[in-house]
Image: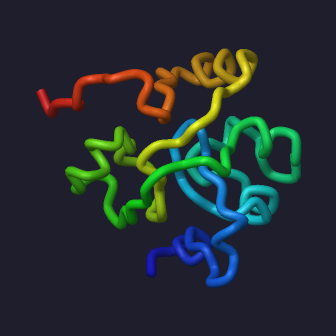
Amino acid sequence: MAKGSEDNYIPTGQFRNMRACMVCSIVKTQAQFMKDGCPNCSFLELRGNADQVADCTSQVFEGLITVSDARGSWVARWQRLDGKYVRGVYAVQVEGILPDDVISSVEEQGIHYIPRDGSVNEALPTDA
C-alpha cells in the first residue's frame, strides 16, 4: 500500500456513515472527514469542523469506483479526477449544492468547480 493510502478506505460496518466530498467526490466516513479532512481538498478545511463537513460533503451519491492511479486511469479521467488525487474510493455522482462562499473559495484556489451531480455536462478532457 502506498504511504497514506491506508487512511483512504472505509472500514466494514461503517458503510451507512459514508459521505462524498462535493468537490472531488472521494468517499470517506463522516468521522474520517472530521479527523483528517479531505485528502484532495485541504482548502475546504474540513478537519475538526462539523459544519463544514455537513456543507461540503453529502450522504447522497451514486456509484462507487476505486482509483489506484489517477494519472493512468481512463475511468479517473472520465470522472474528472485530477492526476494528483489520492488513491481511494470515489462516487460517480454526488448530490448536493455547495454554499456560494465555498464555491468562491474553491475558485479563488484556481480550481474550476464543476458540480459532481451530473447537472453540468463537460467534455472529457483531452491530452492535446
Near-viewer residue (52 or 71): 52
Q: Tell me the residue at 77%/36% (across/down).
A: 55
Q: Which quarter shows the N terminus?
A: bottom left
Q: Which quarter shows the C terminus?
A: top left
Q: Tell me the residue at 24%/55% (across/down).
A: 73
**Vertical side of 104 occupied by 15: above or below:** below
Type of colouring: rainbow
**Vertical side of 23 occupied by 92: above or below:** below
Q: Position of residue 17 (x, y in %)?
A: 72, 65
Near-viewer residue (53 or 60): 60
Image check: 72 left or right of 27?
left
Tag count in the figure?
Answer: 0
Answer with the quarter of the image where residue 127 lies: top left
Q: Position of residue 27 (x, y in %)?
A: 57, 58
Q: Position of residue 3 (x, y in %)?
A: 52, 74
Q: Position of residue 2 (x, y in %)?
A: 45, 75
